[in-house]
Amino acid sequence: MENKKLIFSGIQPTGTFTLGNYIGAVRNWGPLQDEYNCIYCVVDMHAITVKQDPAKLRRNTLDSYALLMACGIDTEKSILFIQSHVKTHAELSWILGCNTQFGELSRMTQFKDKSQKHADDVNSGLFTYPVLMAADILAYNADLVPVGGDQKQHLELARNIAQRFNQRYGDFFTLPEPYIPKLGARVMSLQDPTKKMSKSDENPNAVILILDDKDTIIRKFKRAVTDSEAEVCYRDGKDGINNLMTIYSSVTGKSFADIESEFAGKGYGDFKLAVGETVADHLQPVRTEFDRLVKDKEYLKKCYTEGAEKALRYSQRVISKVYRKVGFVDR
């Protein structure tokens, strides 16, 4: 790989991504490929910390992989693979787990949240998966990790584990820094704009999925919650309109002032229709490319097999040095 900083990022295999995933994260991954060495992965091992239907998990994993490619990840420029195909992640996770304190893991807010949500299955994987997340990053000695607000604590833990390992065995791991993208707005629910857009929302009209067809996208935007003022402007107390303006701005590149001028004297109906049509047209190339990729199973398999081979070669070098440092006998 070229002598550039290395970015690692993983995404859960939830099948299709929401517009929030796309604008906030995935859309920005493509342009990073020219500036950094990029390693991207579908984290299917993380997914099984909560109960999964095996057939659905398999399908969602392949769909997520194809969707990353459709969103601009180039397998010639980046390493793109499926986590369970690269054994070094699990191997490193054990060693890092032995360098992680029980108290650190018990303070993870996501463990508390997920334990409440999945009270019938509070398994040890749910407790230790931040260690596997640290292994995902440190297996490549990544310099940077794109993180949302809910992952900052996990990155901090990865840094603490790396620091503890370095103190115990001598400097080796790079301490990964958060990568804060220049773009990447926070997209809220269309039905409750005080909440983040989430695929788990019970109301399907609250969420735009990037594989929704044009009519569905427009219909959902037409039903978006707004307010009674009928003025397209960005200000406190107008959460619904603020969210729609944020989405429109993210897709068109227009400033809020430009958007206010464009829709001055027009009603919310016109604005919602414009946002819906613009978003649907923007996502059309992604939908087209995704449809092409999922039909070409042989090509998809070639890509994820080669991606795993590259990731294994890269991470194996790191793991071999880690094994030697902790005192394991050479194989």
Image (spheres, rainbow, N blue to C red):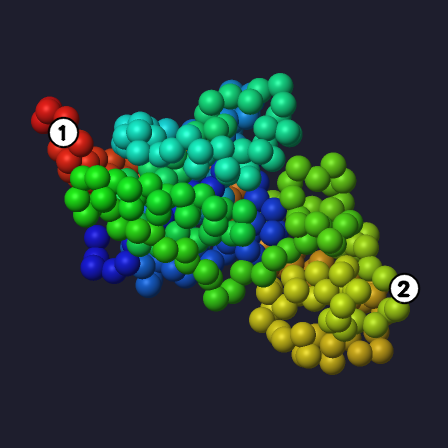
Q: Position of residue 12 (x, y in %)?
A: 49, 38
In this orientation, which residue lies closer to the viewer: 297 or 237?
A: 237
Describe residue 138's horizontal placement relative to residue 272 as left or right. Answer: left
Disc 2 is placed on an element classified as loop
Assign the C terminus to one quadrant of the image. Answer: top left
Amino acid at circle 2: Ser
Look at the image and tell me whether residue 288 can be seen.
no
Q: Is residue 28 above or below residue 54?
A: below
Give the residue drawn at x 41%, y 48%.
Answer: 156
Q: Position of residue 194 (x, y in %)?
A: 73, 53
The quadrant in which residue 269 appears is: bottom right
* Residue on which disc 2 sits: 228
Q: Is residue 246 above or below residue 200?
A: below
Badge 2, how many Cα within 10 Å: few under 14, some, many 20+?
few
Describe residue 151's horizontal placement relative to residue 252 as left or right. Answer: left
In this orientation, which residue lies closer to the viewer: 158 or 205?
A: 158
In this orientation, which residue lies closer to the viewer: 143 or 14?
A: 143
Q: Position of residue 176 (x, y in %)?
A: 33, 52
Q: Is residue 254 above or below residue 61?
A: below
Amino acid at circle 1: Gly
Badge 1, how many Cα within 10 Å: few under 14, some, many 20+?
few
* Residue on which disc 1 sits: 327
Disc 1 is placed on an element classified as loop
